[in-house]
Image (cartoon, rainbow, N blue to C red):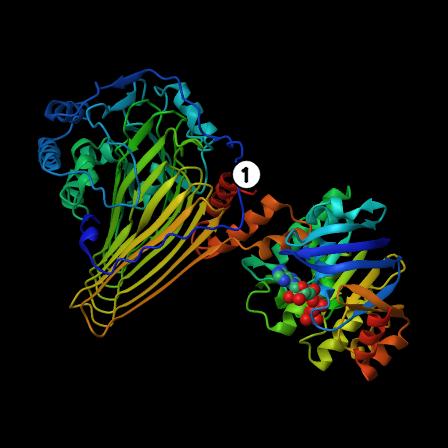
Amino acid sequence: MADLKDQTGYIGSRVEQSTRELAELTDREYKYGWVTPVEQDTVEPGLNEDVIRLISAKKEEPSWLLDWRLKAYRHWLTMTEPRWANVTYPPIDYQAQRYYAAPKKRPQKPGSLEEVDKELLKTFEKLGIPLEEQKRLAGVAVDAVFDSVSVATTHQDILARKGIIFCSFSEAVKKHPDLVKEFLGSVVPYTDNFFAALNSAVFSDGSFCYIPKGVKCPMDLSTYFRINAAETGQFERTLIIADEGAQVNYLEGCTAPIRDENQLHAAVVELIALEGARINYATVQNWYSGDQFGRGGIYNFVTKRGICKGAGSHISWTQVETGSAITWKYPGCILQGDDSVGEFYSVALSTKRQQADTGTKMIHLGKNTRSTIISKTISAREGNNSYRGLVQIMPKASNSRNYTQCDSLLIGNKCGAHTFPYIDVRNMTSRVEHEASTSKISEEQLFYCKQRGIGPEDAISLVVNGFCKEVFEHLPMEFAVEASRLLNVSLEGSVG
Amino acid sequence: MLEIRNLHAEVEGNEILKGVDLTVRAGEVHAVMGPNGSGKSTLSQVLAGNEQYEVTEGQVRFLGRDLLELPAEERARLGLFLAFQYPVEIPGITNSYFLQAALNEIRKSNGLEELDAVDFRKLLEEKMDLVAVDHSFAERPVNDGFSGGEKKRNEILQLAVLEPRLAILDETDSGLDIDALRIVAEGVNRLRTSERAFIVVTHYQRLLEYIVPDYVHVLYKGSIVKSGGKELARELEARGYDWLKEKSAVS
Ligand SMILES: Nc1ncnc2c1ncn2[C@@H]1O[C@H](COP(=O)(O)OP(=O)(O)OP(=O)(O)O)[C@@H](O)[C@H]1O
Ligand SMILES: [Mg+2]
């Protein structure tokens, strides 16, 4: 994404709603804002080669991986933090951050929960993700990541019978080094951007998933990320490989405690779809967003990218971004295989002082490749929301198609919405369509709802949910319900 | 049931209603007619609680309550329904979802149990049959992609589901074809009870042949200049409004 600032064809718009003054209202409680008291194994704040060696040693990594981290680190030193996004924040002191924090009592061998700190199990249970055998969720396998490490991964046994590997990244490095070595950094190289380089140097844990040829994953896979420790960044790394004809639905959720300081979250997610494979990746992002004065909250600087490597492969990103103080995130698809399909469905909500600069990148390389982008942004109170997306059709991508639709909804008169589309078409047989709209929430719609007996806050949430419908349709049922609930909670108090 | 006394209202500083008086009792049907721009929709919107309009003088009592003190949703929950002249589209929300939410809000505030999806569905299907709309209406987004006539019929469906005490129909007949007009009127007639009152705003005598009113009022330049029985509508159809204009200038 870093290269986008140099592109031409920049369209910016700030639209302000002026019809209605919004009342300053009390901040709604963030349901997930508590801190778990656990004994921590941490490294001292600061970043240098020794810290990286220490992280790598703690994880008992092979030397090739340490070398890769060090190369990434040395490259990172030559880079500068990107400032082209439409967000503002004070300089980040990378030496003041801690790059590793792990609960002391955690399973030494994967799959056993006996040695796990009971507080950790309680934490995930409170988050709605029970990990113990008898309580765990039936239809979905969960990898639970707490600060820098994975605590447990459920249902591994059932999945293993189909040859599916679903484990923490650290475990994958130990048990499936060849797969990791082949694909790590193959979609997001450490040179990609500043935050990807930083992640490559210090990444701690995350999920790894491999679906073998022809296998349709029998249950949804999911990773739940929890930040707990203070002054610590979370740098997770997820790698999903769907072999020829394989299919998988992947869900990602995340929360963090309420703190007055900002915390850094710089993740990398890489997806690889081989011939005929399909990956659906859904995120409901609910990191702590900071308070109404802009204090605290997560800086969510994330690089997510998938490659449709094989012919007829299909990657679909669906994201609902309701949390974080700042979101900087552009899940994209490289459509390399002929006839491959990339999709991006996004809802981003910015309220209070939240800032989101998010969108996608669709790079068409193969023939007859198709991509669809549906972006819905909602800005309320003093939130600021930007859609930024690149559609690039390369010379060999004959007969390719893109359809982009960006809709912005404004609630109140202090929020902002912006659209930055970048379109680069180098093949004359291809077609790119872009539609954009910005509107304020309509008084007529709200009055119509009220005339039918629906209260003002429910009226707003009804209209907003309707606005997001095309995106929510792409989420699994429970996620759609959760997404809708999060929107409603975030929007409470935005009516004047 | 409804008592309007000397109601004045303005929008953006222009006075539109200039002293409206009207009394509606349970079971009655009142037709309100009058030239374009005379304030018929304004009256409807003011009664429904649209905050765009500012009431500057007068009182309105509805079922023993001071109507003007209540926000729009409270008025609706009390049993006041407005079929809009221009129904609003809510993309992405199905009629069925919308109406279930609305009905349950109204039931809740009247101390009734909320209906679950199954019971609501049954009710909705009955009402769709009652007002003769296609069952596909249920899963279509509220008024989104509806034709003009379909929107009006959808308003009548909502009326049937929400069972208000007082229903104001603002030009529900405009834009309906002849068959639809008859169907809508039959729907309304089925909903006529001794408990329920209607205010029917219309330009056409034709509707009033189907929905026979107890009273007809002429709203002209923001006040009611003439009231009478159903024969007044026929007279207006024949003579227009000019004779009333002269009359109101004299009086
Ligand atoms: N929201 C508004 N803003 C500005 N002027 C308004 C507004 N609503 C109504 N008016 C004005 O008030 C007057 C009365 O309008 P209203 O819609 O009540 O008339 P009506 O009797 O319903 O007319 P019609 O028969 O054409 O529906 C008109 O001059 C109209 O322009
Ligand atoms: Mg009118």
Front-most of residues B129 and A154: B129
A215 lies left or right of B21: left
Residue type at numbered disc 1? Ala
Q: Tell which subunit mark 1 falls on.
A: A
Q: Residue at x 81, y 59 (%)?
A: B20
- In the rendered image, is residue A276 in sight? yes
Res. B85 visible in picture: no
- Extreme residue in the front direction: B250
Q: Nearer the viewer, residue A243 or B40?
A: B40
Q: Secondary structure at mark 1?
A: loop
Which quadrant holds the C terminus of chain A? top right
Among the 4 quarters of the image, the one containing residue B187: bottom right
Q: How many marks?
A: 1
In the image, ligand 1 is in what quadrant?
Answer: bottom right
Relative to A281, is B171 on the left or the right? right
- Up-down: is A325 above or below B1? above
Residue A225, percent from left and from top: 35, 34
Residue that badge 1 annotates? A23
Location of residue B167 by image quarter: bottom right
Q: Which of A248/A366 is in front?
A: A366
Where in the figure is residue A400, as x and y percent of width and height? 25, 69
Relative vertical location of residue B110 with respect to residue A51 in this rendering, above or below: below
Residue A335 horizontal side relative to residue A487, left or right: left
Residue A460 drawn at (x, y percent): 56, 48
